[in-house]
Amino acid sequence: MKILQTIAGAVLIAGSSIGAAQPPTRPGDFGSQTLTLINSYRTSRGLPALVANSTLKALATEHSRYQAARSAISHDGFRQRSAQARAAGLKGICAENVGVGYQNAQHLFSGWKNSSAHNKNLLRPNLRYASVSVVGNYSTFFACE
């Protein structure tokens, strides 16, 4: 059995160095808007857009809820999420970015883009499927081959 290769991204917290908090563009989960921004960024760099995936959406949402319930960001359970993605038919490497304190899709995307570890995950060339989920102040980007 092929061993699933996994890569977890760094943790990013929105802070005063990024600028003042911006008002939300709409209440609730702006994950799909964030994925649209990620895809525009990827295609501008000659990479394929990531396909939204319902399994990855569920896993990202579950992890964002986990972080919100604990009031802490983490990559706890990353290997288990990767295994669940594999069981659903996704293969190879998975990547994850998490964040806290972002008020809208542009703010979250910019935070990840401007962090080298997060940006590396956004631009992984072999990733094909992804989702972004925001629950309260906590966000998760989860993508797999």
Image: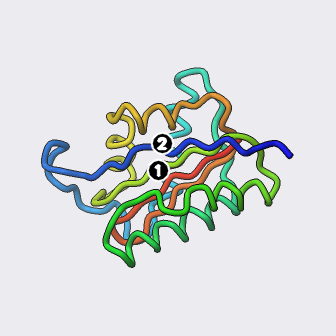
Q: Please report the residue visible at 66 percent of the width from the left and 54 percent of the height from the top.
A: 82
On the image, the x and y values in percent for residue 68 come to 38, 73
On the image, the x and y values in percent for residue 94 come to 63, 45
Q: Please report the residue visible at 39 percent of the width from the left and 78 percent of the height from the top.
A: 69
Residue ID for mark 1: 34
Q: Amino acid at mark 1?
A: Thr
Q: Amino acid at mark 2?
A: Leu
Q: Are marks 1 and 2 in contact (CB under 8 Å)?
A: yes
Q: Which mark is residue 37?
A: 2
On the image, the x and y values in percent for residue 16 come to 13, 49
Q: How is the image coloured?
A: rainbow
Vertical relation: 65 (above or below) 33 = below
Q: Element type at marker 2? A: helix
Vertical relation: 126 (above or below) 110 = above
Q: Is residue 1 left or right of residue 96?
A: right
Q: Please report the residue visible at 31 percent of the width from the left and 72 percent of the height from the top.
A: 71
Q: Nearer the viewer, residue 3 or 117?
A: 3
Q: Nearer the viewer, residue 135 or 7?
A: 7
Q: Residues within 10 Å of mark 2 (few under 14, many from 20)?
A: some
Query: Disc 1 to disc 2, how far (Cα)?
Result: 5 Å
